[in-house]
Image (cartoon, coloured by chain):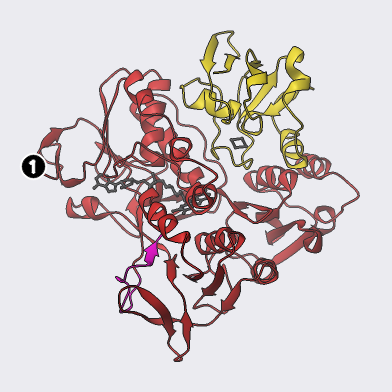
Amino acid sequence: MPKITYIEASGKEHVIEVPAGQTVMEGAVKHNVPGIDADCGGACACATCHVYVDPAWAGRTGESTGMEQSMLDFANDVEPTSRLSCQIKVTADLDGLVVRLPKSQH
Amino acid sequence: MIVGAGQAGGETAIRLRQLGYAGPVTLIGEEPLPPYQRPPLSKAYLSGALPLERLLLKPEEAYAEENIVLLKGAPVVWLDRAQKRVRLQGGRELPYETLVLATGSRARALPVAGADLPGVHLLRSAADVDAIRAELGTARRMVVIGAGYIGLETAAVVRKMGLEVTVIEAAPRPLARVTSPEMSGFFLDVHTAAGVRFALSAQAAVIKGDERVRAVGLVDGEEIPCDIVVAGIGIIPETSLAEAAGLHVHNGITVDRFARTSDPAIYAVGDCVSRPLVHYGREGRLESVHNAIEGGKIAAAMIAGQPPPAEEVPWFWSDQYDLKLQIAGLFNGYDETVLRGSPAERSFALFYLKEGRLIALDAVNRGAEFLGGKRLIEKGASVAPAALSDMSKPFKDIMTAALASQ
Ligand SMILES: Cc1cc2nc3c(=O)[nH]c(=O)nc-3n(C[C@H](O)[C@H](O)[C@H](O)COP(=O)(O)OP(=O)(O)OC[C@H]3O[C@@H](n4cnc5c(N)ncnc54)[C@H](O)[C@@H]3O)c2cc1C
Ligand code: FES
């Protein structure tokens, strides 16, 4: 199963096996990693699942849609590699992916 | 102790641990599943795109890992406030120190003859949807009773699967209770273009059939043949335990801003409560994920002795076909609407103002308008209609300018 590393704003790391087909958001939420709220459960409706994709991986997490972009624009401390993690589908290619979590989702 | 293992109960339990609460936590639910999300029930779970394990808020082990005792399939039948204990079906009694009622709501039953025929369904639980799905393989014609969000989402999903769909609605327009005539008209057109038929200002009088449903008869005598019926005619807050125990209940269990009921040892959260709607200066009951999660956060903070989070402006979403509808605020009492964008291009927002202040919005495929507008509502901002509809500027700039001028 692809392993994903989530790094909390405090620096604490969580390495989680996430089944292909699920999203990067689900990997965190289902394993009680704090820092991703994901209020809407992945419907791309809340923008509380913001993460920073490690620059080394930025090209490999797929395109973001216009909807995701327009919502990310309102997240806190947006960076060029910001994504809504419910919109990143986990595949075998993402084994080793590293994402950092923002200080706050609200 | 938390009674009701749905979205609000699950959130309360997990939050307690995230806030460092170290006492014992027991989460008791009537359903056979750990807490799960209901929104996909009329969307991706109904279509089959989302499997059950992804519906769950967390896998079952996650509760044990957080030292939360989860009792499934365990209806609480009695609440004894004097002795501070609850009784489960079967007689087992459990003591509590602090209780959180998160009992949600139940779907209103169809009040007509024949509602118990095979093939007639309500849509509230995963089990309801499993039963519907089991019949979708052979069903050809569905009647949806009630054109609320759940009814319309269901119509969209099964229409895409190729069934013939007729929606019966007692009001003269769909979504009459929850949105403006403009939005109702938009969704009516969208569904009609997708081939959904509507019987508006029409009331189901009887469901006909022998072995299983064969037709829905309307009050005016018309009969709509069908082989499956899904009714989404509203919900009733599940307040029976609270009422029997003598808690204050009025259109939901009455709570204050801190999720406290009239008993200091009991909190209540989610669909089952009527709470102060601080942005609107009144009390009310909300039926949304936002409300369930926020209630859970507030109750958990209170129990853990930490400051509760500030209330968000109520929000909601609905997915139908390729449309993502996002709603912020409560539109009741508006005196002006402003349109931004193009309904014909299926990308627009409708803003609701009252005395110049933005009080609510409906955004279709417009994430920026939803999030930006939500912030404006939260601040009670007055915004000029011409500014809201100005498509030459990104909405974020409009929001920033409006906030700066308050
Ligand atoms: C089909 C559908 C689609 C929806 N779509 C959306 C959407 O798109 N966006 C949105 O924001 N909201 C949506 N909602 C609303 C949202 O799901 C609810 O507001 C939310 O689930 C409320 O959470 P809750 O925990 O208060 O109640 P529930 O999720 O209903 O949980 C309450 C639980 O308590 C249990 N219970 C009740 N009484 C007892 C008892 N005495 N003992 C033990 N257990 C008990 C119930 O069995 C239930 O499992 C939708 C709802 C449905 C049904
Ligand atoms: S979980 Fe809500 S937008 Fe990602």
Corner quadrant of residue B178 = bottom right
Q: Position of residue B122 (x, y in %)?
A: 38, 62
Which chain hosts label 1?
B
Is residue B148 in view from this perspective?
yes
Colour in which the image shows chain A: yellow
Q: Residues within 10 Å of mark 1 (few under 14, many from 20)?
A: few
- The magenta region covers B110-122
Q: Residue at left 31%, top 77%?
A: B114
Query: Label 1's element?
Result: loop
Q: Position of residue B15 (x, y in %)?
A: 41, 27
Q: Position of residue B388 (x, y in %)?
A: 80, 54
Up/down of B277 relative to A10, above or below:
below
Among all residues in the image, which is located at the extreme bottom?
Answer: B221
- In the rendered view of the protein, which quadrant contains the C terminus of chain B? top right
Is residue B304 in view from this perspective?
no
Q: Residue at left 55%, top 70%?
A: B165
Q: Which chain is red?
A: B
- In the rendered view of the protein, which quadrant contains the N terminus of chain B? top left
Q: Position of residue B265 (x, y in %)?
A: 24, 36
Corner quadrant of residue B304 = top left
